Image (cartoon, helix red, strand yellow):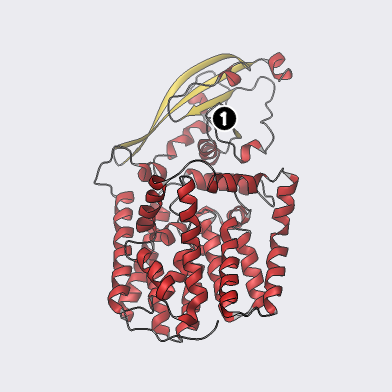
Amino acid sequence: MRASAHSSPGPGMKACLLLVGLGVVVRLALALGTDVYFDEAYYWQWARHLAWGYFDHPPMVAWLIAALGIRGTALLCGLGTGVAVWGLALDVYRSREAAWRAVALWSAVPVGILSGVWATPDSPMLLFWALGLWALYREKWVLAGLTCGLALLSKYPSVLLGLAFMVAALRARRLPAGAWVTAGLGLLCFLPVVLWNASHDWVGFKFQLNHGLGGSGGWATFGEYVAGQFAMGGPVLFPLALVYAVRGPKEQFLLRVAAVIPLLFFGYAAARTRGEANWPAAAYVAACIGVAGMRPVWQRAAAWSGMAVVLAVTSHLLFPVLTFERDVVLARTHGWGLLERLRTPEQLFPGMAPGPTPIYAPTYQLASQLAYATGAETDTVGPSRRKSQYDLWPELELKPGQDVLWCSDNGTAPPAELVQRFGSVEGPVKLTGVFRGRRLHTFTVWRLANRNWLQQRNR
């Protein structure tokens, strides 16, 4: 699996450095110019309660946020992924020029940019996937076991890298003895997550199986998935990844299957349920290396079309000009700062005692944003909430006579199950989140006071 292949000359070194430089500038601009959004805040909440597993994902993103902070995690993982892509491409082509072309292509992949700005499980998963693929290609079995194990500690679908290796081994009719060392180390790294799931009714595995393969889908959801790949993978890189998987060099078969298996698996999942466009992000690590060996015209088209998408989205996020009826991307990344006003709720509700006030919200996303903005204890309650890590944590312990707040982002009043615990409800007070003159959020806040202790004891 270590045979080299000749590469075609493509974008010159100046163009490659320009693309890499643009990727770095975009990451820094977005990291400094956007708010922490709700998924990041949710994982930040995990980092305050370190464990071997969580409701939605394995623990790696929480561990890294605890050590490096939110944006530090994303930026450093993004940097490391780029280095791994460069190193793997260098081994594949034995050419520094080809290695720079591969990292230039990766610098223009929209989903790669996003994972290098916003800290999600994709951030460490892409890093350890790239390192694991590199180690497997070089047949460094101990390193492969450790990096693949760390990938599994980042996101469950990292198991697809092992599947890609097995497909390559079957095709070669060769399974080196060292591969068993890799499998053993990888499973040993992942064992604590399995034990955590076993002690929590397998909640993480059940959630991911239902989230990824449950629900209802069809051609419409599959079409959304394909459209999402043109956007997140790149309008040219995505189809080239499929071409590479089918017609790439034989000696790069491991990389070819590492590119196509995530795309096929999540394409199948998208036909069963509405998925997320970022799910097959790891496919584009190998795809960039493969495209770096294609004809120059395709390399340039893939790189600059991807960068055009990146720059267009970045421009909209930082200096929006176009107006959309429902601007989801802008709303996710801006307008959350005003939630800091709930640090001092006595300014919103005269007569409240100053100090930290517990806050309830209808969703785990908003509960996490509130926790990040205020430092207060938060929880979810109400019929519309999706089960989350909050269901595994203990309920909030309220002090005698302590008021609480209810905050929603759609005008929803406090649910009956919360209201009945208190004797009075005051509100709502409206808070409007604005970015560059655009209204993105309208939060409504209620105060609940005079807690009903008899009702609480009977719950």
Q: Nearer the viewer, residue 448 or 231?
A: 231
Taking the spot 48% from the left edge, 79% from the top edge, the residue there is 252
- Which quadrant of the rendered structure holds the C terminus? top right
Viewer-nearest residue: 415 or 354: 415
Question: Image quarter for residue 181?
Answer: bottom right
Q: Look at the image and tell me whether residue 281 can be seen.
A: no
Q: Is residue 442 above or below residue 60?
A: above
Q: Percent from the top left, x then y, of residue 291?
A: 38, 74
Q: Examine the image and state in which quarter residue 128 appears.
A: bottom right
Q: Is residue 267 left or right of residue 10?
A: right
Q: Residue at x 42, y 58 (%)?
A: 111
Give how far across and how far down residue 50 sits, in percent: 67, 49
Can residue 150 be seen here?
Answer: yes
Q: Quadrant of the N terminus?
A: bottom right
- Quarter of the image holding residue 231? bottom left
Image position of 427 (left or right of 14): right
**Horizontal and vertical percent position of residue 41:** 53, 45
Which residue lies at the image location 53% right of the left edge and 41% below the top edge?
372
Q: Residues within 10 Å of mark 1 (few under 14, many from 20)?
A: many
Q: Label 1 is placed on what type of residue?
A: Ile
Q: Secondary structure at mark 1?
A: strand
In the displayed structure, would residue 90 be above or below residue 130? below
Q: Quickly name the residue at label 1.
A: 359
Q: Residue at x 58, y 35 (%)?
A: 376
- Where does the image place residue 64, in percent across and percent down from the top left? 59, 57
